[in-house]
Image (cartoon, helix red, strand yellow):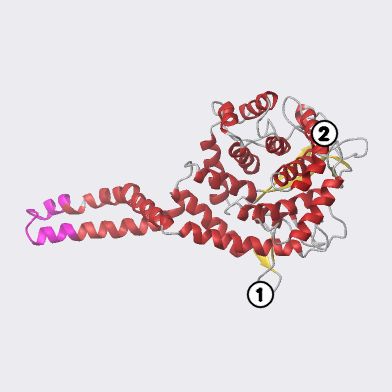
Amino acid sequence: MKEYRIPKIIITCVLTIIEGIIGYILHVNKLLEINGWWSFFLTCIAPVGLFYLINFYVISPIIISISLTVWEKCGHYERVTKEFLKYAQSCVYWLNNTSVHWGEINIANECQNANTCEGLLAMKKTGLDIRYKTTYLDTLNKLMNSVTDKGLISKSLQYETVVCTSMALYLYSLEAKTNNDMQQFKSKFDCVAKNLWGSHSNEGWGVYILKPSQENCSFANTFWALRALNEYYPINPPEYLKMLRHIYETSNNSLFGYNLTDTPRLCTTAMSVSLYYSLNNVSRQVIDDVYDVRKSVEYVHNLFCDKGVECEFEIINGLQSKTVSTKKGPWTHITIAFVTEALVNAYNNGLLSTVKMNSFMDRLKKICRQELIYVNESKTQCYYVPKGMTPSIKGIFTFPTSYIAWALGTFR
């Protein structure tokens, strides 16, 4: 309960003082027989240190936990949820008013497929796809038509990539549940899902819709592919379950880095939790004996709430094809969406205490109040610049705002 250290100290001091006063009153009223100064010291003064430790490590945490539980039951969670959704609305309003839907920056003249997927997911996850129906459907249809049987091209890499293809497949799968117009793309996405699955190696997915070598596999790519395929195939095929188990089995004590040889990272570990909770019960049971979701949740909570990690930078290997000469390139991971999904799901499934959930919500409120930048006096439009991320000199990056809107939409 490190996040409540100051309240613990205050409660402990108050309790210890009260206990001391009670002891003194008992002594004055001769209800506590003490003969001599030395006996008084041993009986009343010396135990104060012991009382302080008991109060600090036992009584204070109990009082805080009970108080927070009562606070939650009285509607605190609901009030904060409404606050988060207001921030989400301002973020999506800003996204809706950018020059194109969506470029890398707010004043871009050309949309990028990855940023387009991220903007659409921001609207979908917040439920604001209904409010901005024209923008959402026009952009969605353009994206669906841009997808080929092989996948979705990254305009910057000029080749079908795993992340762009996975996001498009994931979007299609979400939309197809309620939008009958998506039926026209069904045969295309059958091919997309087949090609995405066929592009994995034994250790997962790389950058492109091409089988990668082991050193070019990335857990971020892999979790995107697995999540998209899981959404597309609600009843997971046996070969998917076998691959799923193998990936979770390769974790570092239930934590994931960028690749097999990397140290644990917040983004990929949070992605592992998000994927876990998107699986059906049968699929979860397949990996439960090789993956401890509690360890992942604890790591995600500590790194985000205590360390304040809002973005991470991965150097991707394998950026090489017939049309691309670069062998390595940077990838900025905005952690907030997957972290929020992971922790909200953990809380709803009883794996995150009220105390820890409250500290996470406090952290999220602090980010919203300090790092969302409003662009008008009425405070109806804002964008997000994560701590630790260098802003673009050409304009404002759109993708961080998409991810924080996604995160805040998780509380719906």
Mark 2 element type: helix
- The answer to whether residue 102 of the structure is visible from this angle is no
The x, y position of residue 35, in whole percent, is 6, 53
Look at the image and give the residue range highlighted in magenta: 22-43
The residue lying furthest to the bottom in this view is: 377
The x, y position of residue 153, in whole percent, is 86, 43
Residue type at mark 2: give it. Cys
Q: Is 334 rendered above or below residue 131? A: above
Residue beneath the point at 58% across and 28% down: 287
Residue beneath the point at 90% across and 39% down: 325
Q: Is residue 256 left or right of residue 35?
A: right
The x, y position of residue 353, in whole percent, is 45, 46
Residue beneath the point at 57% across and 46% down: 303
Q: Nearer the viewer, mark 2 or mark 1?
A: 2
Q: Is residue 45 left or right of residue 366?
A: left
The residue lying furthest to the front in this view is: 180
The image quarter in which residue 223 lies: top right
Judge by depth and name the residue closer to the eye, 119 or 356. 119
Residue at numbered disc 2: 191
Residue at numbered disc 1: 378
Judge by depth and name the residue closer to the eye, 96 or 306. 96
The x, y position of residue 164, in whole percent, is 79, 43
Mark 1 element type: loop
Residue beneath the point at 50% across and 58% down: 78
Q: Residues within 10 Å of mark 2 (few under 14, many from 20)?
A: some
Is residue 252 inside the magenta stretch?
Answer: no
Q: Residues within 10 Å of mark 1 (few under 14, many from 20)?
A: few
